[in-house]
Amino acid sequence: MELIHCTQGKGCFVGPDPEDGGGTPELSASWQLSLIDYLPRAHTWRHFQGSSSDCRYRLHVAMVDPDLLPNREICRNIHQLVTENPAIIANYGPFQGDAELRQALSVYFRERGIAAGAEEVLIASGSQQAIDLVARTFTGPGDTVYMEGPSYSGAIDVFAARGARIVTVPVDHEGMRIDILSQLCDANPPKLIYTVPTFHNPTGTVMSVSRRARLLELAQSYNAIILEDDAFSDTYFRTEPPRTIKSLDRFGHVILVKGFSKILSPGCRVSAIVASGTILNRLIAAKTIADLGSPMLNQKAILPVLQSNLFQRHLKRLRAALKSRRNIALELLKRHAPRGVTWTEPEGGFNIWVTLPEWARATDLYALAQREGVAILPGITCYANEPEHHRFRISYSFMDENSLREAMILLCDVLRRYLANPVPRETPSRPTL
Amino acid sequence: MELIHCTQGKGCFVGPDPEDGGGTPELSASWQLSLIDYLPRAHTWRHFQGSSSDCRYRLHVAMVDPDLLPNREICRNIHQLVTENPAIIANYGPFQGDAELRQALSVYFRERGIAAGAEEVLIASGSQQAIDLVARTFTGPGDTVYMEGPSYSGAIDVFAARGARIVTVPVDHEGMRIDILSQLCDANPPKLIYTVPTFHNPTGTVMSVSRRARLLELAQSYNAIILEDDAFSDTYFRTEPPRTIKSLDRFGHVILVKGFSKILSPGCRVSAIVASGTILNRLIAAKTIADLGSPMLNQKAILPVLQSNLFQRHLKRLRAALKSRRNIALELLKRHAPRGVTWTEPEGGFNIWVTLPEWARATDLYALAQREGVAILPGITCYANEPEHHRFRISYSFMDENSLREAMILLCDVLRRYLANPVPRETPSRPTL
């Protein structure tokens, strides 16, 4: 008999009943259940490949609408690459990544105040892998890792899998509370501090310039690493955000991860790591162990876009489109959200962080919204330790304006009904995925 | 001043002198040197991105000659994919991999006696990542991992990085010595056994059918996992090798890794993992944590080849070409290698394992050969623990027949000179990379 089995922290699977004992081969595979693994947490997998993906209105994914990306230009490059040099798919690339792409990225970074030569850039397969490479190289069970609470779920998965001690630091309107971080470091010196300083995921806040400087000083005083995750800085709505922490870094404390999935092409799976010295060398070694280097075709595909004026024009259009969608989402929240619900008003990025009254549970809301075809991200997935149950994230980046309007109105309707008539506590409130 | 700095187990880098103390920013980055990392071994990086890559004759890489691969066909597919659906590069794929590719692979595996449905296949970015996913999911500092000694260097790097206790088992003409493994398991029960049973890397041997069956029984009796790395089974020269251990597996003990870099396209970076039950589910979660899934374009690129008759025709041609090169290499060794040198005679795969007299050191030979423009792989990189210094690997798969002839004659010449007049022990014998 096929049943659904649930494992703490990992979600639920369909499969033979493990209680059913010996007999047929399939059932005897129950020996597997006692296998110890090193995956204490796998929320990303659980939340983004489950039934949420079947929802008509996808407010839960911090993905950009494919229609806002320069797909034709990138595909034209790919066409040219495979026409001119079919052997591009018959060779491994350099472990560190394509030299031309690293050169183009060096220019990109220099324009943003980061003096990194091509030799200080390492190509990875998306920000997720970049974060994972840093974590697997420098963090383990003995190490204390600090990060914002809430934070990016995929990064929490990574550091949890390394067995690191994760300490979360609250966020306010100026980003991570460096004063609190500083106190915490007294008791537990940091090995690594993970931060999304610009248009923070999930809250959308921007770390102030003075906090950036203080964070760097703190890392210097502890000989610690800052892992700066910059997915969103190019997607500002009014004025350019403060420069990266990496641009202030003189002694190689900051590892910058720049993903291109949010602004160019998630499908190419290309990100860049900027680091220096032995930190860089060790990360290249880790990339080699992880997968022998990213595919060349995917790296070369985005190269001409980065090298041309098209990139700036594209970013300008992308910013305008995202701003318009942000405005729609905020406008509809203002008009239709019930009393007691509050939210952040991001000046860039993809995300709005919504807070319910303290007694409410976003997972209950999640289940109700899903029935209406609206997917949201329950806030609990964004906390490494004790979660705040009354918060959730919505992303306005993925749906076109009309769908977004419909989704926001539906969501506000569900919100109103939920707060007026909460799900009784007896009902299972855990999302089934 | 730019100097070369060497770190035990990781090789050498050019950079500012860390002894030079404070002063300028670059030099103050010396704090990085005291950062503890989790990379006890990174031989692959060291041996394949160093000066060996500049050699004219590349006998050190177990790569297939790009001219032997169906590049035009794959590139034609890519062209069609980006023309028909430019949004393919604007979306993430499923974490587990493209459903169509998994379906086609299910057929491929069924033809080889492995009854795996599409839902039991997970796509990874090359065999290297597939091995890494298994290692990071199931092995850690408390676990004993068995593997052949010698073995694939990239796999040793992976398990060493996990902090697993690696125990090596000798190999003879029938593959891994299961009798010795069995004795070793009494003292240290296995968590995982990594094996390359078919055209073993680096020795080229094939594990006998009876040993395959005994290995599986052993894994069952210990509730252990077998990680079966099958890169080479399609490249046989006379008769089909025995079926995979996975094809005998009834209770989900075997995780099969099938790479397509050796037979279709290293540049696409596509491999398949076949597993079942909770082992499979945990591997999908690990893949998600590692990089959110492999790029769709790369997966779709090889799909039509796998689905068509072209694949069988291509494999037939590939086998003939490799056999011809193997014959050239063996023929020239027979004719020109000095007395005291012996080698394996593989019936498939890419590699010949050469043994020098016991007093000799392959790293000395490596340095001498490199001066003549010939790169070989010193055997020490293939051992997890105490290495055998007098062995090395050559691969006949990468160079065309004429270059291969020149390379083999040059190598035999260096061999003769080295054995007649060994490098004095005082000379540094460690390869500088």
Image (cartoon, coloured by chain):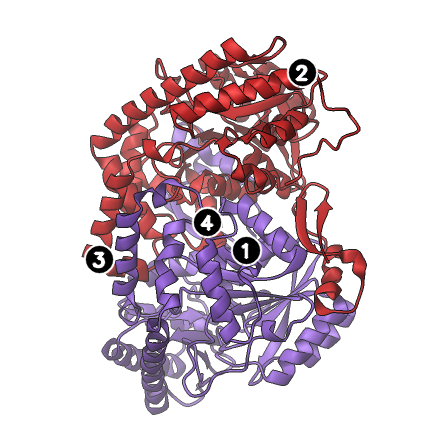
Chain colours: A purple, B red
Q: Position of residue A132 (x, y in %)?
A: 54, 55
Which corner quadrant holds the N terminus of chain A?
top left
Instruction: For marks 2 and 4, give the one nearer the viewer.
Output: 2
Chain of residue at mark 2: B
Picture coordinates of residue B206 (x, y %)?
47, 17
Residue A316 appears in which quarter of the rendering? bottom left
Q: CA distance from mark 2 to mark 4?
A: 48 Å
Disc 4 target residue: B287
Q: Nearer the viewer, residue A333 or A345?
A: A345
Mark 2 or mark 3: which comes first in sequence?
A: 3
Q: Is residue B83 above or below residue A344?
A: above
Q: Is residue A112 left or right of residue B106?
A: right
Q: Residue at x 38, y 48 (%)?
A: B96
Q: In which chain is the residue bearing label 1?
A: A
Same chain for mark 1 and mark 3? The answer is no
Residue underneath mark 3: B85
- Evaluate if marks 1 and 4 touch, with contact meaning CB atoms under 8 Å apart: no
Q: Nearer the viewer, mark 2 or mark 3?
A: 2
Between circles 4 and 3, the one closer to the viewer is: 3
Three-letter code, disc 2: Leu
Q: CA distance from mark 1 to mark 3?
A: 31 Å
